[in-house]
Image (spheres, rainbow, N blue to C red):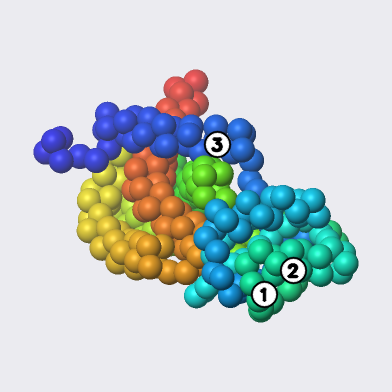
Amino acid sequence: MNRYRLLGRKKFWWFTISVLIMIPGIVGLIAWKLPLGIDFRGGTQMELTMSKNPSESQLRDVLVGIKEVKGLSLSRSEGKSYLIRMLPISEADHRKITKQLGEKFGKVVERQFEAVGPSVSKDLTRKSVIAVVLAALLIVLYLAYSFRGLKAPSSPWRFGLTAVVALLHDLVITIGVFAIFAHFFHYEIDASFITALLTVMGFSVHDTIVVFDRVRENSSKNSSLAETDFELIADSSLRQTLNRSFATSITVIITLTSLTILGGETIRPFVLTLLIGVVIGTYSSIFTATPLLVVWQRFATRIKKTQAQT
């Protein structure tokens, strides 16, 4: 029977894999940081269509040569349009840039021009941090309330805090991997990135709650075994929910993969963030959150036994 156990000695392999996945993202985040978009640092966004339809490299070369263009980010939008992002420019600079592009690539049609000031970016940053912290706090409170019937040495707070630790693990990896993609594909962080992170949080916690709820049910049905061998209860619960977790996640992953490949440039960073988060969230719910809960539970049981002996 031990051959089919997902925990036991294997749980330390799962922890090792989690660490190995985190390292490249953390290194990428430290080395390249997150390229903040105009929503956060303030700037200008232009969506242009040019009659000669230049390639991305041709347009980039021309824009780099214009001294008014700083902090350039360029991507192809829908059809023949280009989305150009840069640091704030004056109206005179705006006209000058459009004129020079027209001289080089023919008639320029401006489909969008948007300016975002620094005051907006600071407000978005503050609200984004508050949203993430508040979501994590509510998750702990919700799980602690939902699992309040657990008997010692199990603790409803332990379930809630473990879910949040696994959630932070997912966010760190998602942000780190996105930082690597952003460096090589010139993506930027905007308000939709925060939306994607919050969505990832919800999906990851949902998956974790499915497993934890089965652990709670099995612990209640066999309270004596839960006290003596909580790991066996957790392992059995994992195997019971494994097919459901994978089936749910795979359907979402297939959809997001299709959107990443076939979707437009404007939504690709958002969809890619979701894809990374869903994949990591599926892994952590099974191979990070539950093993971590088992290790913490075993530590609490040992402390209880030591206190009882003294």
Pair 3/1: label in front? 1
Query: In this rendering, does residue 187 appear at all?
Result: no
The crowd level at tag 1 (other Cα within 10 Å; few <14, some 14-19, many 20+) is: some
> Is 195 above or below relative to 296?
below
Q: Circle 1 is placed at which residue position?
A: 108
Disc 2 marks a residue whose amino acid type is Thr
Q: Position of residue 271 (x, y in %)?
A: 47, 63
* Picture coordinates of residue 29, whole percent (x, y): 59, 38
Q: Nearer the viewer, residue 7 or 280?
A: 280
Q: How crowded is the residue under tag 2: few (<14 C-alpha within 10 Å), some, or many (20+)? A: some
Disc 3 designates what residue?
Answer: 28
**Looking at the image, is mark 2 or mark 3 earlier in the sequence?**
3
**Of the residues shown, which amino acid type is indicated by label 3?**
Gly
Image coordinates for residue 207, horizontal then vertical, percent: 39, 58
Q: Residue at x 62, y 54 (%)?
A: 60
- Residue 52 occupies which quadrant of the picture? bottom right
85 to 19, vertically: above or below: below
Q: Which residue is mark 2?
A: 98
Q: Are marks 2 and 3 in contact (CB under 8 Å)?
A: no
When asked about the image quadrant of residue 258, the answer is bottom left
The amino acid type, in three-letter code, at marker 1 is: Val
Q: Secondary structure at mark 1?
A: strand
